[in-house]
Image (tube, rainbow, N blue to C red):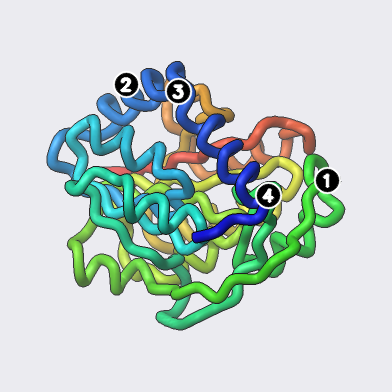
Amino acid sequence: MRLKLNQYFGFLRSIVIYYRPTQIIRWGRFYRNLLKPGDLAFDVGAHVGSKSRFMNSAGVNVVAMEPQEPFASFLGKTLPKKIKFVQAAAGEENQNLTMAVSSKHPTVSSLGKSFLDSAKSAKGFENVSWDKNQLVKVVTLDSLIDHYGVPDYIKIDVEGYELQVLNGISRPVKIISFEFLPSIPKLAENVVERLSQLGEYRFNPVVGEQARFLWGTWADKTSLQNWISAQAVDSKSVDIFAKLEG
């Protein structure tokens, strides 16, 4: 696929950011502690595939999902054969939708209208523009489960579309993680409510790319909500992990 100059630099920037040697070591160790060999994981919003590869190296069976070009083509050609690749987004229904794409900052391309509306005035998005559209295939997590089985872990990184992803699943999963952007806290609050509908979860954040839990013990919903509301808008992005009790 031929890339324009800004697309090329956006793609290259993502490769450099997510394949740093220190991150490879940290995330490999993190996933070996979180999951066990033979577990099944869904990587929803695989982007450049770094987390899929790190989980695969820990012996985890991975289904990677990514709809956005050129990343989808890159993953289809370079992922280890053991990783199952699905060129699609996850959402509430099996359908086709239009994704707003940022060529220069492809990590913030999104299907989420509320995210796009909020991001235009949010801290950290001042230099971001969504200059392209791409029609993408959308499938539900339930349909993915019907095909591949119930996962032990679902990683969701979809720039404000997390709630819609979780609206496409009808059962709890042992571990789910999703991205929290402190500049747009309402999105995370809605996701926490949806997780509470699915099952009894406890929570623990991972800040930025540190690949370690912030808290020594897993917290309840109220404690997490209080922590979310206390975060400064210019704080680093966070992956919030939710673990099913029992």
Residue identified by numbered label 4? 5
In the foreground, 106 or 94: 106
Q: Secondary structure at mark 1?
A: loop
Residue identified by numbered label 3? 23
Lower sequence index among marks 2 and 1: 2
For the residues labelled 2 and 3, the Cα–Cα distance comes to 10 Å
Task: State the mark number for residue 127.
Answer: 1
User: Could you tell me the amino acid type at mark 2?
Assistant: Arg
User: Could you tell me the amino acid type at mark 1?
Assistant: Asn
In the foreground, 214 or 16: 16
In the foreground, 245 or 117: 117
* Horizontal relation, residue 206 to residue 150: left or right: right
Pair 4/1: label in front = 4
User: Could you tell me the amino acid type at mark 3?
Assistant: Gln
User: x and y percent of residue 213 in the render?
Assistant: 46, 25
Quarter holding the C terminus is top left
User: x and y percent of residue 64 in the render?
Assistant: 34, 53
Pair 2/3: label in front = 3
Q: Secondary structure at mark 3?
A: helix
Task: State the mark number for residue 29.
Answer: 2
Looking at the image, which residue sits at the far left? Answer: 38
Pair 2/1: label in front = 1
Q: Is residue 49 above or below residue 76?
A: above
User: x and y percent of residue 19 in the render?
Assistant: 46, 29
| Viewer can see residue 223 | no
Lower sequence index among marks 1 and 3: 3
| Viewer can see residue 225 | yes
Q: Is residue 131 above or below residue 122?
A: below
Task: State the mark number for residue 199.
Answer: none
Lower sequence index among marks 2 and 4: 4
